Amino acid sequence: MSEIILMDGDCGLCSHLGRFLKAKLRKEYDVKILAIESPEGKQLISQFPDNIRDIDSLFLLKNGKIFTKSGASIRILLYLGLPYKVWFPIFWAVPYPFRDIVYNIIAKYRHSFFARPEKCTF
């Protein structure tokens, strides 16, 4: 089974990141990038546990596990080639609560800095 990244298709930042990831993902990984709002994305999220389903987050589904927020973001670095994947151990060394604080700040203001796309572009 491939890994799946679920991103907000209605977000300019996520749209840019989705296109970037598609261009930079290493070929040996079978990673699918979906918009949360897509029919397949909605169907996957409907199967998530209640405490995860309503989180406003990026999701990574890997080996039957669901990762969210900074945990998902940092793990995605491992799918990229150099120089991006070298950041994984550096960011992973930052304690989880601090990583999620930074993630939450970026998530809160992402629509202020990045225009919403007219349509999902990844």
Image (spheres, helix red, strand yellow):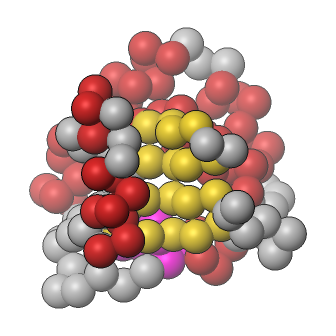
- Residue 115 is left or right of residue 24, and the answer is left
Q: Is residue 13 visible?
A: no
- Residue drawn at (36%, 84%) of the image: 121
Residue lying farthest left? 112
Looking at the rendered image, the quarter that the C terminus falls into is bottom left
- Residue drawn at (28%, 27%) of the image: 51
Query: Which residue occupies the foreground of this view, 11 or 58?
Result: 58
Q: Is residue 103 visible?
A: yes
Residue 18 lies in the magenta-colored region: yes
Residue 106, placed above or below residue 98: below
- Residue drawn at (17%, 86%) of the image: 118
- Residue 21 is left or right of residue 2, and the answer is left
Locate residue 54, reporting x and y percent: 21, 39
Locate residue 119, reporting x and y percent: 23, 86
- Residue drawn at (46%, 24%) of the image: 99
Residue 80, placed above or below residue 96: below
Residue lying farthest right? 28
Residue 111, placed above or below residue 58: below
The region drawn magenta spans 13-20
Query: Which residue occupies the foreground of this view, 89 or 50?
Result: 50
